Amino acid sequence: MIALEHYIAVSSLLFSIGFLGVLFRKNTLVMYMCLELMLNACNLGLIAFSRFHGGMSGNLFVFFIITVAAAEVAVGLAIIVALFRKRQTVEVEELNALKD
Amino acid sequence: MNPETYAYALLAFPLLSATAIAFCFRRSGAVASGVSVGAAALILATALHIIFKVENFEYSVSWIEMGSLNVDFGFLIDDLAKLMLFVVAFVGFLVHVFSLGYMKDDPNKARFFGGLSIFMFSMLGIVVANSLVTLFIFWELVGFSSYMLIGFYLDKPSAAAASKKAFITNRVGDFGMLIGIIMAFSMFGSLNLTDLSDAFGKDASLLETAGVTAIGLLLFCGTVGKSGQLPLHVWLPDAMEGPTPVSALIHAATMVAAGVFLLCRTGFLMTFDALTVITWVGVATALFAGFTAVAQRDIKKILAYSTVSQLGYMVAAFGLGSLAAFHGNGGDHAHMGEAVVTGGVAAAMFHLTTHAFFKALLFLGSGSVIHACHHEQDIFKMGGLKSKMRITFWMFTIAVLALTGFPMLAGFFSKDAILAVALEANSAAFYLLVFGAFLTAFYMTRLWIIAFLGEPKSENAEHAHENGPVMTVPLIILAVLSVIGGYVGFYPEVVGGVINAIPHPDSAAHTTILIASLVAVFAGYGISYFFYGAGAKEDRLESAAKPLHTLLAEKFYFDHAYDWYVAKVQQRVASILHFTEQIALAGLIIRGMAGFAGLIGIGLKALHVGNIHVYVYWFIGGLALLWALTGIF
């Protein structure tokens, strides 16, 4: 039998991988995928809680998150593509024009 | 039609006229004067309709509502307002007509008539206002129009200075009045005149509290400023820099009388102490201005001081009459709040009305003289005008007699009413006011003899000739009113509430008053005639008593004292405050705070390194801090 703890463990693991990825990877595209990973870790947690709680509100949240994430991906990928066209790179270390 | 429609119309005509002149006819004087005089005629018609055909009424609409603050806009038409309405509308119309002649050749005629219209709007607003707030707003507006018209001759520095002086001096008085209004609101929660008078009607013991005395005296500050009472009278003589019709309308007949009207409107809240102060300020002003008028050379300045003096009479009449009502009730205040019109109010309003007629006549007459003498105002450069300007001369003579209180003319009756209340309330004030009547007769006879009799004393006076009917007809109408305005029967029953309250002393007191005033007046005529003879070339008082003449001609050094105060005291205090302000407020607090924020900004700027990873670390750090603060750790 798979208990709530297992779901939470997987969810936490996914979140940590995503978070550390954002922290340490240099490629914007990869960092972006890590962000998505964190969102889906949350989704997994919410679904699990919803299932074990017996209510539907968690599922509702998940739908919203998926919708927003879809929109966010569309915008985010477009930004990254535009960025690459302009700077010929997506490495974070080289994108430091915000300074000054 | 609803009664308030007429009141709205009354205010709309002059406002529309002023707006039209300001926006459309600024360059076409002929159209502007037509519009303005037309508006004045409509005002007169509406006013007469309200006086005779409309019952007394009160009307108000809610204007501002904020929490407990409710301000109404409305009209209160009662006998008092009707009497004042008549004075303002009638004298206003005549002055408009007279101005057609007087200002005929002025290139800035349009601005002048626009100013007259905005003045009529403001003044009528004061008359019909039903609350202290509305009254105060219009009060400030008359101050503005007075400022605008005193400084009408833009190229004269003295006119600019006089208009500024008038405005600032009035501001001093109005500030007191505003505080009085705020105090009244905090004490009674309403500024509606009827509400206030009801509050006093219900609880007469209010008239014994110090707070109410303070309110009364603070409201009186407004009167002191507007009606030129001591010590804020200094602006009124200087206001004569404006065109003469303005002096007649604003600075003699109506606006300066608004102060007296305010006293009468708020008479119900005057306590014994407040009335005592008001009385003595009035008496002191009447005498002071009478003395000062004796040594002036400028025809308009003499008339201006005479106005100040007569306003002193009105204020004193209000004070004395209301004091007499206090005495009459034997200290029992039960009926004070209910008594709508006391003898003092009636005597003051009676003198206000008759004074408006003959003083407007005097000013218009002097305007006629000045116009004929090519803007010569020094009476010692006139002379011999009697034969050259017959109509003006005779009308002026009637006005002089009416003002000085010659028997059977208007001023005689109204001054009698004032002396009657004075005799009842305070015999010292009575004798001082009788002496004031002597002074009035003295200086007016001096003016009359020197300006009109004898030989012409200058080129301009020699070439003087009578003006056209536009200028003489208003004089004749005002002269008729100066004669019949003193008879109670002249006034219609609709203003009976005021007129019937005019005190009529019993026969013994009446004899005393009659003898005293007649002796004073004829002594004034006689001594003046004896002293100045027919057409003195020089001021004989100057050669006879030089120090006295200097004291009077310098107006008891009031202006010098104020100059000294402003230059030496106020200016220095202000520069000290300015210095402190620059160091403490502008330097430390404002610049200091800005500098502090700037420094923090410079420090925080170092955190922006442009590397997304660093921002993520900052983000984690911030999150950790937030957790720590919320106590998760």
Image: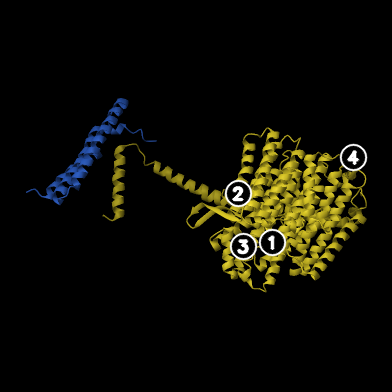
Depth check: B487 or A27 in front?
Answer: B487
Q: In which quarter of the image is residue B211?
A: bottom right
Q: Where is residue B509 in the image (x, y as percent from the top left)?
A: 79, 69
Identify the secondary structure beneath mark 4.
helix
Vertical relation: B324 (above or below) A27: below
Q: Which of marks 4 and 2 is in front?
A: 2
Q: Are marks 1 and 3 on the same chain?
A: yes
**For this view, does B600 lie left or right of residue A65?**
right
**For this view, does B136 lie left or right of residue B87?**
left
Residue type, label 2:
Ala
Q: Do labels 1 and 4 share a chain?
A: yes
Q: Mark 2 lies on which chain?
A: B
Task: Give the color of chain B as drawn.
Answer: yellow
Q: Mark 1 lies on which chain?
A: B
Depth check: B618 or B369 in front?
Answer: B369
Q: Nearer the viewer, mark 1 or mark 3?
A: 1
Q: Earlier in the sequence, mark 1 or mark 3?
A: 3
Depth check: B534 or B467 in front?
Answer: B467
Residue type, label 4:
Glu
Q: Which residue position is annotated with label 3?
A: B215
Q: Nearer the viewer, mark 2 or mark 3?
A: 2
Cα–Cα span, label 4 and label 3: 55 Å
| Label total for image | 4
Instruction: Look at the image and tell me whether residue B281 can be seen.
Output: no
Q: Earlier in the sequence, mark 2 or mark 3?
A: 2
Q: Mark 4 lies on which chain?
A: B
Cα–Cα span, label 4 and label 2: 49 Å
Q: Do labels 4 and 3 share a chain?
A: yes
